[in-house]
Amino acid sequence: MALFLATEAVEKESPFTELTGHLTPHHYGWAPHWEIGGIDLSPTNAVVNIWLASFLCLAIFWMAAKKRSLVPSGVQNVIEVMVDFVKVNIVYSVMNNKDGKKWFPFIATVFFFIFFLNSVGLIPYIGFTATANIFVTATLAILVYVLAITIGMAKNGVLKFWLKTLVPPGLPKVMVPLMFLIEIISQLARPLSLAVRLFANMLADHLMLLVFAGFIFLAAGTAVIYGILPISLLFMVIFTGFALFVAFIQAVIFAFLTTIYINDALHPGH
């Protein structure tokens, strides 16, 4: 549990403490200490990097929109390509035009926020991948799932929504109890799978980077360093590029499943 729970400020005892700090939520020594009613509310590196991801997301979109032109270039061009990708390949590949137009802003926000959360962990020294913490991904997954069933109940009515969701139309009566049980398990598995998938992939991705960085420290001060250093650096560069790709893919998967859950809630039983 120490891997996931916020601990006291990490003491800089060795280079390995610095490395594991990229995976272990902890308090920064410079951060303010907030305590209310005996509850420690001091910001951890996970919280700070969530703030950082939010700031970067807003800043980059502000830069892209600041000097808009008919023929996009630079940041505007990159953002427009990514926005079009989300619209065409995620939202409108699942939803009809009416629903897609309504829910595209929310799903695009989910995509970019997850992407930046996944990516800030690649920033040296200050970076911490908040999505490599199961509590962060579980919170995001539960919020998405609760939103989906809430809008489904609001649109279709509570009873109608759950009847269509748990008992598909046209199902033989003899199959109703079994299908009801299966659908209950399926609904419970949705937020769980959404949270664990994102968490596990981001954790494994950064563990690989730390392994190659650890080789350098293990060989430091020995003759082996001359052979280990170039190989480890090469693999770190390769895996950093791969990590950025994984950050993108996991954001796509999270946004795509969010789209599916919202669409299923809007049209239960389809």
Image (spheres, rainbow, N blue to C red):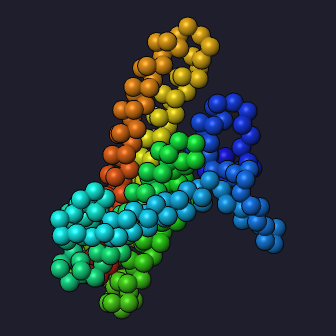
Which image quadrant is residue 64 in? bottom left
Q: Is residue 109 visible?
A: yes
What percent of the width, then of the height, locates residue 155? 33, 90
Q: Is residue 250 above or below residue 167?
A: above
Q: Is residue 150 above or below residue 232?
A: below
Which residue sits at x=63%, y=37%?
18
Q: Is residue 186 above or below residue 20?
A: below
What percent of the width, then of the height, locates residue 98? 20, 84
Which residue sits at x=43%, y=31%?
236
The number of discs equals 0
Q: Is residue 166 above or below residue 6?
A: below
Which residue sits at x=59%, y=36%?
19
Q: Nearer the viewer, residue 153 or 15?
A: 15
The single residue placed furthest to the right in the displayed view is 38
What percent of the width, then of the height, locates residue 13? 73, 33
Task: Answer with left or right where residue 201 lies relative to residue 222.
Answer: left
Task: Answer with left or right where residue 208 lies relative to residue 270.
Answer: right
